[in-house]
Image: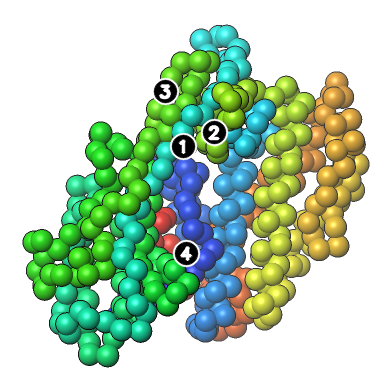
Amino acid sequence: MASFALQNVYNNFLTTYAPKSTRYDTHKKDELRNVYVSMLRQTKESPLFLPVSGEDVVEYAVSMKENARDLSNVIASLSNDRTLNLLDKKTAFSTNEDIATAKYIGEDDTVDGEELPAFELGVQRLASTQVNMGSFLDDGVMTLDPDTYSFDVHIGDTDYEFQFNVESGDTNKEMEDKLARLINRSNIGVTASVESDGQGRSALRFESAATGQPGGRETIFTVSDDNTSKRSGAVEYFGLGDVTSAPSNAEFTLNGSSHNAYSNSFTIDKAFEITLKGTGEDGETTSIGLKPDVESLISNVASLVDGYNRFITNAMSATEKYGHSNKFRNEMTGIQNVYRNELDAIGLSFNDDGTISIDEKYLRAAAVERDHEETLKPITSFTNEMLLEAKKISLNPMNYTNRVVVEYKNPGHNFANPYITSLYSGMMFSSYM
């Protein structure tokens, strides 16, 4: 029961601090092995600490862990092989980001030895979700008989049954709120909300997380209680069975050739990750291609600084809220002091709050120098230092809490305990697997 409660607590924090996973959260076997080896090394000589508890400790540890993961992912996105390659990483451009945005995900800037050409993208229709809008019912009453009801949601190839009790005195609004929470907690790919018409009536609204019509299906999910295990009638009462907005595929053109996709995000030639944003007026298109080397470098540095600033801002805020340890603040001050002068010389200056500001004039001047790799080396060194810091925090965020040492181990006569770092903050959770 305790482990189940802890998992619920972690999932709550995970929803707050890390709502989405990225492709950089997947790892090769050797990378996972390196994490395990690092855990062995760290815990073999680690002192024994008194257990710490409290919601503030849990929140701080999870926050630090997720902020470090976010920074690691930003750095990984600027490399081809999880080692920083900031000077060579290409970036994509879109001349009209109201139509589509582009991100370069390729290994190099050529296809079969030829340079990747730019292309024209036009959007005729965005991929849309499915919506089932229920009936608007008076908030303060309910005419559904007290009983145990159930209904089924079929999505993909899976059926989910939801059961709920109607008690005497329940109102439509209370039951709609209850059902919305029930659906949202289940995480089945359908979100629920309660809509009001401003006249004392409200309705349940179901919407799919997915878009489009994969496999030619006209619907993404269906709601019924025809063959449910408990009493039926709730679907008809709340009006949940009718599709009010059918899903649709995205329709777009590439260099004038028509295409469609289930989602508004897709890849082209394993080189560009495209996200459709809107339709162009009167056949308007956007050009997608690769930025020149200098522009790519400046864009990469800007992305790195944005990720670092987000990390510093969130981690410092969490540290101040926790208020019982200055370890993280002291470590970051030390790193900043080491690289302050070198970074300032090429246009990257530390602010009083630890964030970085970019002077593009100085950065561009450094980027166009003949020996620019050597000139910009402080950026690479600083980023590698921050990557090590992020990995250290991810391995054991509890190290940044206020812990009391019970005893130190006898050096050279200890065994490794790789699970001690996960005693509180957790290593084996669904979104990490």
* Residue 339 in the image, given as x and y percentages of width and height: 83, 49
Of the numbered discs in the image, which one, if any, rests on residue 111?
none
Chain-order first, disc 3 or disc 1: 1
Query: From mark 2 to mark 1, how far is it between C-alphas?
Result: 7 Å
Label number found at residue 259: 3
Sequence-first disc among 3 and 4: 4
Amino acid on which the number 2 mark rests in the picture? Thr
Name the residue beneath numbered marker 4: 15
Closest to the observer, 367 or 358: 358
The secondary element bearing badge 3 is classed as strand
* Residue 126 circle label: 1
Q: Sequence order check: which comes first, mark 4 or mark 2?
A: 4
Identified at 42% across, 23% down, the residue is 259
Image point 19% across, 47% down: which residue? 157
The kind of residue tagged 1 is Leu
Kindly identify the amino acid type of the residue bearing the numbered disc 4.
Thr
Label 4 SS? helix
Alpha carbon distance from label 1 to label 4: 27 Å
